[in-house]
Structure formats: C-alpha cells, structure tokens
Amino acid sequence: MSGEAARVLAEADQSAWNGRIAESAAPILGLAHWDGTLYLDRESILDPLQHMYEHAGEERPTSTLVIYRESLATLLHEHAHFLGPFGSSQEAAREAFTKPGSRQLEEGVTEAWAQDHLDEYIHRLGIDKVAPGIDSVQASGYYAAFVPAVRELTSDLESRNDLRQGEVLDLLNRQTAASQMPLLVTLVYNSTRLPDLEPAGDNTRSRLESILRSGLEHLDNYELAPPDFATTNSLSTADQILNHLTQEIQSAEAAYPSTPPRAIAPPHADARTLPPPVPTRDVPSPHQTALSGLMPPTTTAPPAATHPSPARSNHSSGSRQALTRTA
C-alpha cells in the first residue's frame, strides 16, 4: 500500500493514517483529519491515479505524466505528515502544531523530504512500469516560502554535526510536530561546545528555540507571495536565523573564559535583521493539504470540528491548486 511504502521509505516507526479514505462531498480537494481519516477530491487526485492504472504500460504524453507525478507527489507529502516515532499521538502533534514556527517547520520538512524521495517512492510502488517516463518529468512543488529556509537550516546543521547530506531532513521527517522542534534545538545545541561547558543548558536551549520559532514564524509573510519572491526571502530569513543562532552560541560560550568562543562567521556578514514582510499581503487562515492512500473512497461529508484548531495550508510554488487539511 502507498502508506506503508512511505513509512518504510522514511524508516519511520509508525503512521497515524487509519487506512480510511472518503471522497469528500465538500468543495475541497483533500482533507486529512487529525483522527487519521483522509477525504480526497475525485477529479484532482483519485481520477488521475485511476486513469494511470487503467492505461498501465502505455506511452502517455508529457502533460499527462506531469499530472500523474503531481498526484503522487502530493500523496507522498501527505503520507509523510502521518509519520512519527513509536508512541507518538495525533493529539500531541495537533497541540504542538499551534506553537509559533511549528507549522512552517513541519510543512517545509515534509515537502522537502517528499521532493527528494519521490522517484524512489515511485520505483518502490512499481509506478515507473505502470507509467513509463514518469520519472523523467518534473512536478512543481509546494511551499516556496518554507522549503528553501528549511533546506538552508538543515544543510547547515549537517555541516556542523558532520552528518551526511539529507540526514537532518530524514530525522525530522520521522517526527511529529510534537518532537520536530525539540530535535532541531538539540541538533543546534549539540553542534557547539556547550554540552561540555554548561551544567544543564536549559536556558541556552530556550533561547535557541525562541530564535528558531520566531524566525520560522516570520516565513508566513511570504506564503502567498510569487514563488521567486518567496524563495529569495525564505533564504534570506534562514540566513538571519543562522546569524542569530551563531551570536547566541558565541555569547553563551563566552561565559566560560577558560574556553574562548569560536569565531564563527555568520552566513552573511551584513545580515542583521529579518527581511521585511510583503507590504500588502492579506493573511489567510492557515490550512494544510492532505492526500494519502489509494483505497476505494466512499462519499462522506467530513465531520464538523467540535473544537476548531489551526489548519494547515499547502500553497504551490508553481501552479498547483491548493489543498486543505483541517481538524
């Protein structure tokens, strides 16, 4: 199944997907409830995948292959949202998701990881045989405001911790929102000399977390901006976050005079403040895409949320239509 293939590919302990798929009667493309149920739009996701299997092995035009690939990219992205370690719960993830910076981190990690592993996912499912040439076309991605910053931050941490390329993304993708930020803070903290200097490090960890959360939350200002503008400011914001982290680390290490602080140059020496938000942006309610699985759907209206919580929205970096996840 598509969900198990994603879990194995990610080397995650578990998936919160409950195996249920329902065709939504509401005017939405896809909705993933926090209870693990998936509501999917037939025209945008289910029909293209059904068409792909009905024409298995046939040569298809590039435009059709792109549609197939985009459906599968969204499928992998949404399966990744349900991954977590043993014992993790959607309730804890939902609560953590409301904290500053958590949504931006989770969406950036999920989308970046899905982009990097889509070809392998396609091969694991044997879809390269079903739709010949699908691994030679490209699909547009989501979250131009989040993905570049997440890639910049995780790449820096891989260098600091002497980890292989993509390893931090892999580690974060196996976590829920409840454990992603704590893991990110730990990776930053452990990349310094502070674990050997401080008795506990709680105060320093708290300050590092505050820098990460406020910086990542700032990315919301570019979520609806044109892709090029969003990408540029996402990278600039990541540079500011790394600069502020470096300053905080140097300040903390300087408190121990027997060990002089490292001279770490910031990513850009002239970077001091976060880039300004888009001046005329109307801030929407957050949403989240959710697509997963290929089980036969049933036509069912999504349950009303008795306790509304922040939703997550998936905005295209190109022309892909937005999808929604609410709780």
Image (cartoon, rainbow, N blue to C red):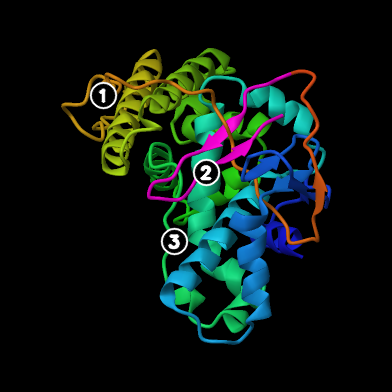
**Residue type pointed to by label 3:** Ala
Q: Are marks 1 and 3 in contact (CB under 8 Å)?
A: no
Q: Under tag 3, what secondary structure?
A: loop
User: Separation of disc 3 and disc 2 at Cα?
Assistant: 18 Å
Q: Position of 23 compared to 115: left or right?
A: right
- Say which of 170 and 311 sits in front: 311
The C terminus: image quadrant: top right
Q: Main secondary structure of the magenta part?
A: loop
From the viewer's perspective, is residue 228 above or below residue 117?
Answer: above
**Residue type pointed to by label 1:** Pro
Please identify, in this view, whether the residue under mark 1 or under mark 3 is nearer the observer.
3
Magenta-span inclusion, residue 170 = no
One can see residue 168 in this view: no
- Which residue is rendered at x = 61% and y = 45% of the image? 29
How many neighbours does mark 3 have within 10 angstroms: few (below 14), some (14-19), or many (20 or more)? some
- Which residue is rendered at x = 26% and y = 37% of the image? 229
Q: What x and y, as percent, mark residue 91?
A: 78, 28
Q: Are marks 1 and 2 in contact (CB under 8 Å)?
A: no
Q: Position of 151 compared to 74: left or right?
A: left
Q: Which residue is mark 3?
A: 139
